[in-house]
Image: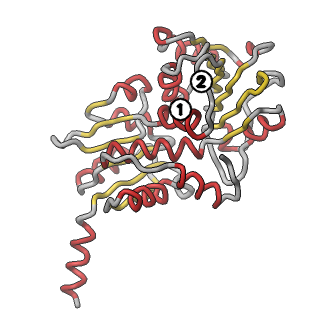
Amino acid sequence: MGSLAGKKSILMNLKDRYAVFGQPIAHSKSPLIHQIFAQQTGQSLDYEAHEVSAELFSSAAETFFAEGGKGLNCTVPLKELAWAFADCKTERARLGKAVNTLSVQADGSVLGDNTDGCGLVRDLLINHALMLTGARILILGAGGASRGIIAPLLEQSPRSIVIANRTVSKAIDLAGEFQDRGAIAGCGFNALNHSQFDLILNATSASLSGRLPPLEAGLLAENGVCYDLAYGDAPTAFVRWGRENHAFKSLDGLGMLVEQAAEAFYIWRGVHPETRPVIELLNFQRGENQP
């Protein structure tokens, strides 16, 4: 009997191991998402969520990879630390100065990538059939979440991107890093008066505590869309603000979560999973039926 258990343990250990690190992490839907992706594509792997603080990230990541782990997702507050941890980085990770996906390469080095921006763009373009070309886009916040989505948005040739932030200098500095890629500017929230936007993206952490950035009414253009990079089982404060201000659509980041996970899965496994069934399942589980 002991021999059978030992063989079973060895077989289980042959599965490639992946995980998501973050703090907090108990709410994470990533293990379920990757489990479904694995079933879809016939992949044999283990994916777990681990609560890891910023102080312990480096040692925890080193241990994970030393014990044979193949790839990590990193979420709040670890993306900048993951950027520093990576031995080499993709262009989109270098531009974003943040990493949410780490993967072991054939030579044993660890590659850092950022799939947030492409996940957002895919959700907007494919799942919600929105047009970004020629759009006036407002990004709320100038932190790591904003940094990771700017380049992929500019690749869609919007008319302009404005970054608004409480600390004005951070918004101006961040916009300056991308000025060679398109029309982009930074400002404070009070400078948005009389401006209108086709798409407003909330990349602040305010939704995590049920708060809103200081927004005036009238910012949304006719048929304008609101999109919160955060998500939850109930509509976020920003999603509610969008509805109250007559947004054509007011969305949260659940689709972005699934799309960025699909890109990470492709980086690790070399196969593209189907995202729509996963998005539909997660929306069903939270009692919503978003397209």
Left or right side of 122 for 2: left
From the top left corner, tell me how far across and down residue 80 is, in percent.
43, 33
Residue drawn at 51 percent across, 30 percent down: 144
> What numbered label is drawn on residue 121?
1
Residue matched to label 2: 132
Dot 2 alpha-carbon crowd within 10 angstroms: few under 14, some 14 to 19, many 20 or more = many
The span from disc 2 to disc 1 (Cα, nearest Å) is 9 Å
From the top left corner, tell me how far across and down residue 86 is, in percent.
30, 36
- Please say whether residue 167 is visible from this viewpoint: no
Most distant residue in the bottom direction: 1
From the top left corner, tell me how far across and down residue 224 is, in percent.
74, 27
**Colour convention:** secondary structure
Q: Secondary structure at mark 1?
A: helix
Q: Secondary structure at mark 2?
A: loop
Residue drawn at 54 percent across, 14 percent down: 175
Callout 1 amino acid: Val
Dot 2 and dot 1 residues touching (CB under 8 Å) = yes
> What numbered label is drawn on residue 151?
none
Callout 2 amino acid: Leu
Most distant residue in the left direction: 107
- Please say whether residue 8 is visible from this viewpoint: yes
Tell me if residue 278 comes above or below residue 159 in the rendering: below
Residue drawn at 70 percent across, 54 percent down: 288
Residue drawn at 32 percent across, 59 percent down: 43
Q: Which image quadrant for residue 190?
A: top right
Left or right side of 103 for 285: right
